[in-house]
Image (tube, rainbow, N blue to C red):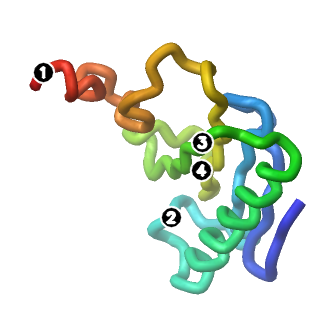
Amino acid sequence: MPSNALAHIRLDGFPVSEGHLLVIPNRHAADWFDLTPAEQKAIMELVEQGKQWLEEHYQPDGYNIGINCGAVAGQTVLHMHCHLIPRYAGDQQDPRGGVRWVIPEKADYWSSR
């Protein structure tokens, strides 16, 4: 798995999809906003390297990238981690809205037009 001096990647223990990765800083930080600029950059570099790794091993059709910051945002593990979730054609009947579904009643904005 790719890594750098400030962060590393591992497979998620409770994957949303096959190949679901976590990008995790080596230093403990509660969330994204507690990271240094260098750590944030290191995380984003690994998101790109993780995408390349997923392309080689799983050939997904798309991706969701997500970071939960705080309990109200759904964070249950109080150590910052970034989800890199591979998406596959047909894994959802209608994937429109993607991460907007964290608040379901606001996700389907295109139907209200």
- Check if mark 2's residue and mark 1's residue have beta carbons within 8 Å: no
Residue type at numbered disc 4? Leu
Counting other residues with Cα less than 10 Å from the Cα at mark 4, is it few (<14), some (14-19), or many (20 or more)? Answer: some
First-in-chain label (3 vs 2): 2
Could you tell me how many numbered marks the image carries?
4
Counting other residues with Cα less than 10 Å from the Cα at mark 2, is it few (<14), some (14-19), or many (20 or more)? Answer: many
> Which secondary structure, mark 4?
loop
Among the 4 quarters of the image, the one containing residue 99: top left
Q: What residue do we see at 29% from left, 28% from top?
A: 107
Q: Name the foreground residue: 62 vs 72.
A: 62
Q: Nearer the viewer, mark 4 or mark 1?
A: 1
Residue type at numbered disc 2? Trp
Residue that numbered label 4 is attached to = 78
Question: Any mark on residue 32, and which?
Answer: 2
Mark 1 vs mark 3, CA separation in Å: 26 Å
Q: Name the foreground residue: 50 vs 72.
A: 50
First-in-chain label (1 vs 3): 3
Q: Is residue 44 above or below residue 53?
A: below
